[in-house]
Amino acid sequence: MLKTKKNTYIILAIILLLIVLLWQIKFKNSNSSLAYDFAVTDTASITKIFIVDLKGESITLDRMENNWQINNRYKVRNNAMHIILKTIKNISVQRPVPESSYNRVIKDLATNGVKIEIYQNLNKKPTKTYTIGNNNADHTGTYMLLENQEQPYIMHIIGFNGIMGPRYGLQGQEVNINAWRDKNIFALNPKNILSVRLINEQGKDSSFAIKNISGKLTLFDFQNNQTKTQQEALFSYLNLFQNINCETFKNENVKAKLEESKKLYALIVVHQNGVDSLIIYQMRDKDSPKTEAEKYTVERMYAVLNSGDVMLIQNYVFNKLLITIDELKGE
């Protein structure tokens, strides 16, 4: 009888111990899961993304009615927005940072990390906040750490062989607003264009203007004399303004250097919603030139919009706009 009671107590003690162990395991797992819960699966509910580097450079991506905007000023490239939302949804743990690398990775996150805040449903507090560090040795993942957690992880996307930083628009460990901007310069319906004037600074005789006068397109030379040409040629030219992109936007410090460059063209487009104009400059070749003619590249040019923005444009894209009046006349 005593032996039976003793066995019962032992069994009860074992059961109680197992319950305690299971509770501890469950508690530990529930807490540790918070350490790698980076993903936001419902990206449709994301209304704002804030990104800031340790230099204090930051961008805020806001969801608008029909697009996303950067810092309430510029339209975001659709492709860039698609990539970051896909990343936020599908990012997952490759593996925890091993103990042998822990101190190094934590130091890297503290000295080189970029902070990400993700907001949903117009809430004032972020749903997720985490820091993005450098990449692991084989460049198959990126060190990341969730706010208020101690364990960093190597993060990746299953099926994607690469690093995470560029998918958040980072250049190295720095925020660059130009990486996010929509590169479209002209997206005009030709029927809404009132006039186009192209001034060739190197040969004024080849300059021209096209004006929409009472629904009829009319060509004028550089002295504002009306010139005969085919309507189809003028409409085909205006049709080009439906989709013209720059290669990239440049920082303000480039504008000062343009004083050393030769001004090539002025392009002024008046349309129903306003005026878009740009001044186009030669671009200096980075390589040391042997002759004066070799100082400039023919593949790219700089352009300054009337908004003050500086762009790098490709001759391949713009050469169809930068034509002569004789080409419009078919001569």
Image: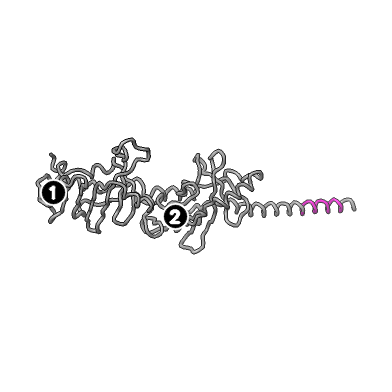
Q: Residue at x 44, y 56 (%)?
A: 59
Q: CA separation, marks 2 and 1? A: 52 Å
Q: Mark 2 points at which residue?
A: 44
Q: Which region of the structure is painted magenta?
A: 5-16
Find residue 284 and report its horizontal and vertical position in percent.
33, 43
Q: Mark 1 points at which residue?
A: 221
Q: Residue 270 carries which label?
A: none
Please tell me which residue lies in front, 275 or 81. Answer: 275
The part of the image, by quadrant, that contains residue 306 is: bottom left
Please state if 99 lies on the left or on the right of 260 as rendered: right
Please tell me which residue lies in front, 268 or 229. Answer: 268
Q: Which residue is drawn at 39% across and 60% down?
A: 72
Which structural element holds mark 2? helix
* Colour convention: one colour
Q: In which quadrant is the C terminus drawn?
A: top left
Please tell me which residue lies in front, 325 or 89. Answer: 325
